[in-house]
Image: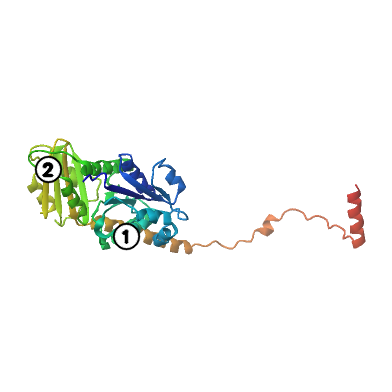
Amino acid sequence: MNIKADTLFIGLGNCGCKITKLFAELGYSAMFANGSEQDLKVLGDQKGIFKLNGYDGFGGHREKAMNCLCDNAEFTNALEDIPQSLIFIVYASGGSTGSGLSSVVAQYIIDVYGETKTICMCPVLPNVKEDTNKLWNGYQVGAELSQMDGIGATFFIDNNSGDNLKQINRTFVKVLNAYLTDDTWSDANNFDEAERMELLKEQGAMIISQSDRQYKILDDLLNNTIFAPIENDKVVGKFGIVHGGKRDISLDALIAEVGKPFNIFEGFGKNGTMIAISGLTFPYTRIKEIGELAKKAQQERQRNIEARKAHSLPSLDIMGMMNTKKPDAPKPKLTGREALMAMRSRMAN
């Protein structure tokens, strides 16, 4: 099995398409779906581009997603002809197109293929400084994902983890690509492809860290990360570890931080150290924060609207003060015949 060859990335909306393009440039199969021709132009001559006709964003109305799929048969036909068994759906949870389509597309794939596909969701959570609508969309996406059955691991990329959004995107692509393509081996033990798929099939949040800084990778994993902070509940599914040196990761320290896993897969290699953890509780604290910020901002907006209604302007009559021009002398009223003759005279001249 070759995980990379058996993987498809589906980018939804502007953000999802940009990240998916980075994976396509690394040789992964990809599909891109968006309603904006301007946004799609940045993809260049990439294959698998689908223009969602009639849907240049949903304008915050995420319920339009099902209508969008109904109106774009070319895209749904492509969804029914996916040969790869591992699918990543990438999108901005605060956006319009991506947030609206993500769960609907995932459910569509589940309905078509059942358990023969592993679907991993990759939502990009909005920064706390984003506008109210994006925060609210992000909260709704989190609520939808928590109720979905049939999906595998979910990677919550957090735009609140730094100011350089492009760097956040590139880091996600780097660590996930390292995870999917790692081919290091040793006589001692290996974290092989089947074991890596085990983590991806585990429902719940998943995080990955890959670094040459062997003795700081645990801190990178939990604190210096692009992923949303994990919940402090010690709920965890599986560990996947590639030691860059002779057992450089302390399992006791890792378990103390995140909890005791159901299974631990370990390998050894020379391409740096990597830790992957799946089956984590969704980052509900972060998602709840997004929702509360949206609610607070909307309440403030409503108060401002009510305060605006209390303002009024006095009725001022200044027309008489402005009318200072002397009236023109009244013109003599012409009779019907005189008016006609005057008109003929003007025409003759």
Q: Quadrant of residue 45?
A: top left
Tell me, for residue 142, which label it has, or none: none
The residue that label 2 is drawn on is: 190
Residue 6 or 284: which is nearer the viewer? 6
Task: Describe residue 36's horizontal placement relative to residue 191 as left or right.
Answer: right
Expressed as whole percent of the image width and height from the top left, the position of residue 231 reads 19, 55
Closer to viewer: mark 1 or mark 2: 1
Rendered view: 214 above or below 36: above
The residue type indicated by label 2 comes to Asn
Expressed as whole percent of the image width and height from the top left, the position of residue 348 reads 91, 49
Residue 140 or 87: which is nearer the viewer? 87
For the point 22% across and 41% down, which residue is it? 181
> Disc 1 on helix, strand or loop?
helix
- Mark 1 residue crowding within 10 angstroms, few (<14) / some (14–19) / many (20+): few
The residue that label 1 is drawn on is: 112
> Disc 2 on helix, strand or loop?
loop
Rendered view: 150 above or below 23: below
Expressed as whole percent of the image width and height from the top left, the position of residue 84 reads 28, 50
The residue type indicated by label 1 comes to Val
Task: Describe residue 308's horizontal placement relative to residue 100 as left or right.
Answer: right
Q: Quadrant of residue 73?
A: bottom left
For the point 78% across and 56% down, which residue is it? 327
Tell me if I can see residue 164 in this picture: no
- Mark 2 residue crowding within 10 angstroms, few (<14) / some (14–19) / many (20+): some
Residue 328 or 153: which is nearer the viewer? 153
Expressed as whole percent of the image width and height from the top left, the position of residue 347 reads 89, 50
For the point 74% across and 53% down, which residue is it? 325
Tell me if I can see residue 65 in this picture: yes
Q: Are marks 1 and 2 in contact (CB under 8 Å)?
A: no
Residue 316 or 89: which is nearer the viewer? 89
Q: How is the image coloured?
A: rainbow
